[in-house]
Each structure stands twice: as structure tokens, then as C-alpha cells.
């Protein structure tokens, strides 16, 4: 179905297939992700790309360090030589994307995780054009100069938990845990949590094709799946924060499929517009204080998902309460996350408040 939609240029069907069923394999994904993002290689300038990849920018040294420690999870069994080749390509993709943005966008730690999945699924040149588009759209407020708007967007998380599971939300409120555990959800798209490239790619099918806040829905869906474990914790912020940072996001759903379905059901039941309005009432915040919401809610239809989700829970329906945990890596340690949130030393997302840009139809 995805290939037929691609061949027919049927973007609406392609979006639905991506978010509900997934795109099956890398060959289709390499084409479909580009189509969903409104990019292609038709006007790709290879000479310009290589020139930009050698260009300088203020975060080049951070890119180099991040690339040196990347790709381990998705290249198990590879030779050092093969991994080094991919790392060199990853560094070119990141540097070229930042240099080409000419100061409008900047690198943040975690962008290399997103770029790694794009690279391994689609190849170097498609990864570059897709990453450049994401930096201007879904990841736009993660790639500008102030951490403030991204932290402000985290205010959406606890109202979303309250909508999904009031008991769980009450526990979090009593613990006093701030929503900073969700920072990495937006910055890395859970790429560091996936146990395999297929798991990460299936979740990217959803995130490429949907609203910039969809990572919040994915994370909250995972929290609800782990509610029993969370409710057994000592009701104190450090313990709860540590669990949520280490939470095995993919524990319940092979290839992220079930997780995507639950996130979709939650999105349909409590879309960002409704959450923004609720947050405005509860926190007395204007819409302008939530840059992503203000920017993307005007893109009529671009972020919609199917009203019915075949094979998944109906919006507002009951979700399974327990999951068998699988081994999962820690995305960001509690200390690193705290440092990122309060000092901005490691994770430095940016926001261009005046850039509205419309998602390509």
C-alpha cells in the first residue's frame, strides 16, 4: 500500500500508512520519508554538499565528539572500518546541514541520534536533505538559540499524563517531579532507546509523518504502559525522575508498532490544540508562550492522523497495564539531563520565534 501511494503521489494515504502500519522496510522508507517531508534529491548539489560538510560552525567540535561515540547500537557485528565509514558520513551530514542553515539553525547534542537513523535507513544524501528539512520543521525549536521555549513545551507533558491516566498524574504531582525527564524525547526521538534499527525506524515512520509534539504522546504512552512500576516507586522526585529517564520505552512493543498505535490513540483523544487550551487555563499562559503549538497548529490538516486506528486501542480506551521489560539503554543520565535543563551545557536547542514555515502538503 505504501509503494502504491508513493507511485500515485497520494500523500494522505502515505501518511496514514506510515503512522498506523509502518513502512515495512528501508527501501520504501527511504522514498516515503522524503515524500512525507516534501524533499527530494532532484535539485541536490553534491559539490555544495561536500563544501558545506567541510565548512566551519561553532559546534563543529561537539559534532566530532558525538559522532565518535555514535552508531554502536545499530552496528553490532560491524567491523571498525565499516563503522568508521558510516561515522564519517554522519559527520558530513551533520556539518553540512548546520553550515547550510547559515546561522538560522544550530547543532544540539541528540541531533546525531536522529541523523544516525536517517543515514542507516536511507543513505547519506537522502539523510542530509531530510535532516535539513526536519531542522526547519519538526525539530525547528530544538535547533535555534535558547533552551527556554523547549523547556516551556515540556509543560504539555503533565496535562497529557493527566488526560491519559489521572491516577498516574496524581502520583507524579505528589512526587514533585518536574517534566524535564521528557526533554530527550523531543531532542532524540527515542533513537537512543531503541534496541534495533527496525524499532527506531518504525517509530520514525510515525514521527516523520506527524506533529512535532508526537514524541510527548509516545513517551506518555510508554509511561502508561509502565504505570504499575511507577506507582510502586517511592513518591519522591529524584526516584521518579531516575525511573522515567531510564524507562525502557520499547519494552512492550516489538518494532515500536504497539507503542505507535497507543501514541496515535492518545493524540486523537487529546490533540495539541486541546492541550494548549487546557494549559492556558491551568497555567494562565498565552498561546505565544508555547512556540511549537502556535507555529504548527496553523498548518491545517498537515498533522492530522486517522480517526480510527486499526488494531489499536480506541481513543480513551483501556490500555494494557503491564509489560515484560526488555533490555534498554539509558538515553540520557539524570545528571546529564539536569545539566541540560538547568545549565544548557550539553543540550542546547534553539528557537526562532518568528519562523512560521508551513509543512509541505
Image (tube, helix red, strand yellow):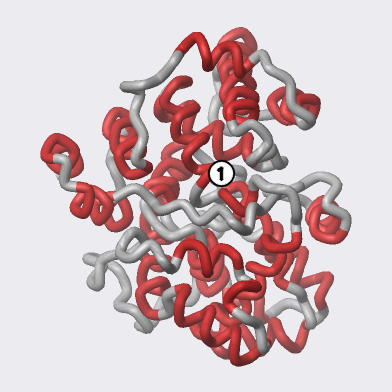
* 62 w.r.t. 212: above or below: above
Observer able to see residue 330 = no
* 314 w.r.t. 244: above or below: below
Is residue 346 shown left or right of residue 12?
right
* 81 w.r.t. 127: above or below: above
Image quadrant in which the N terminus is located: top left
Q: Position of residue 51 (x, y in %)?
A: 59, 12
- Residue at 50% across, 9% down: 47
Q: Position of residue 90 (x, y in %)?
A: 59, 23
Q: Secondary structure at mark 1?
A: loop
Q: Nearer the viewer, residue 341 or 83?
A: 341
- Residue at 25% across, 56% down: 16
- Residue at 64% across, 26% down: 99
Q: Residue tagged by mark 1?
A: 191
Q: What is the quadrant of residue 174 in the picture? A: bottom right
- Residue at 41% across, 66% down: 298
* 111 w.r.t. 180: above or below: above
Q: What is the quadrant of residue 288 in the picture? A: bottom right
Q: Nearer the viewer, residue 242 or 191?
A: 191
Observer able to see residue 295 = yes
Q: Position of residue 45 (x, y in %)?
A: 44, 15
Q: Position of residue 71 (x, y in %)?
A: 61, 28
Q: Nearer the viewer, residue 29 or 6?
A: 6
Amino acid at each position: 500500500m505504501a509503494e502504491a501511494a508513493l507511485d500515485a503521489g497520494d500523500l494522505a494515504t502515505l501518511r496514514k500508512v506510515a503512522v498506523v502500519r509502518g513502512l515495512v522496510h528501508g527501501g520504501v522508507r527511504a522514498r516515503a520519508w522524503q515524500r512525507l517531508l516534501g524533499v527530494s534529491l532532484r535539485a541536490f548539489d553534491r559539490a555544495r554538499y561536500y563544501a558545506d560538510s567541510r565548512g566551519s560552525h561553532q559546534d563543529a567540535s561537539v559534532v566530532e565528539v558525538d559522532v565518535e561515540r555514535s552508531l554502536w547500537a545499530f552496528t553490532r557485528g560491524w567491523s571498525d572500518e565499516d563503522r568508521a565509514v558510516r561515522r564519517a558520513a554522519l559527520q558530513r551530514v551533520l556539518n553540512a546541514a548546520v553550515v547550510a542553515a547559515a546561522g538560522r539553525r544550530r547543532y544540539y547534542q541528540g541531533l546525531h541520534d536522529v541523523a544516525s537513523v536517517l543515514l542507516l535507513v536511507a543513505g547519506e544524501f537522502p539523510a542530509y536533505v531530510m535532516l535539513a528539512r526536519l531542522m526547519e520543521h519538526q525539530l525547528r525549536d530544538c535547533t535555534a538559540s535558547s533552551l527556554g521555549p523547549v523547556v516551556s513545551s515540556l509543560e504539555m507533558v503533565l496535562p497529557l499524563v493527566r488526560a491519559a491516566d489521572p491516577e498516574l498524574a496524581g502520583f507524579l504531582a505528589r512526587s514533585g517531579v518536574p517534566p524535564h525527564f521528557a526533554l530527550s524525547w523531543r531532542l532524540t526521538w527515542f533513537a537512543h532507546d531503541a534496541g534495533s534499527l527496525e524499532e527506531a525506524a518504525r517509530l520514525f515512520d510515525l514521527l516523520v509523518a506527524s506533529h512535532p509534539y508526537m514524541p510527548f504522546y509516545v513517551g506518555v504512552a510508554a509511561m502508561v504502559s509502565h504505570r504499575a512500576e511507577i506507582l510502586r516507586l517511592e513518591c519522591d522526585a529524584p526516584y521518579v525522575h531516575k525511573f522515567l529517564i531510564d524507562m525502557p520505552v520499547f519494552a512492550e512493543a516489538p518494532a515500536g508498532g504497539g507503542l505507535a498505535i497507543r501514541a496515535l490513540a492518545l493524540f486523537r483523544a487529546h490533540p495539541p490544540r486541546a492541550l494548549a487550551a487546557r494549559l492556558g487555563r491551568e497555567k494562565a499562559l498565552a498561546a505565544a508562550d508555547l512556540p511549537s503549538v502556535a507555529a504548527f497548529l496553523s498548518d491545517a490538516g498537515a498533522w492530522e492522523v486517522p480517526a480510527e486506528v486499526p488494531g489499536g486501542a480506541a481513543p480513551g480506551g483501556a490500555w494494557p497495564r503491564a509489560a515484560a521489560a526488555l533490555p534498554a539503554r539509558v538515553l540520557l543520565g539524570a545528571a546529564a539531563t539536569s545539566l541540560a535543563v538547568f545549565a544548557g551545557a550539553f543540550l542546547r536547542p534553539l528557537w526562532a520565534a518568528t519562523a512560521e514555515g508551513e509543512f509541505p502538503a
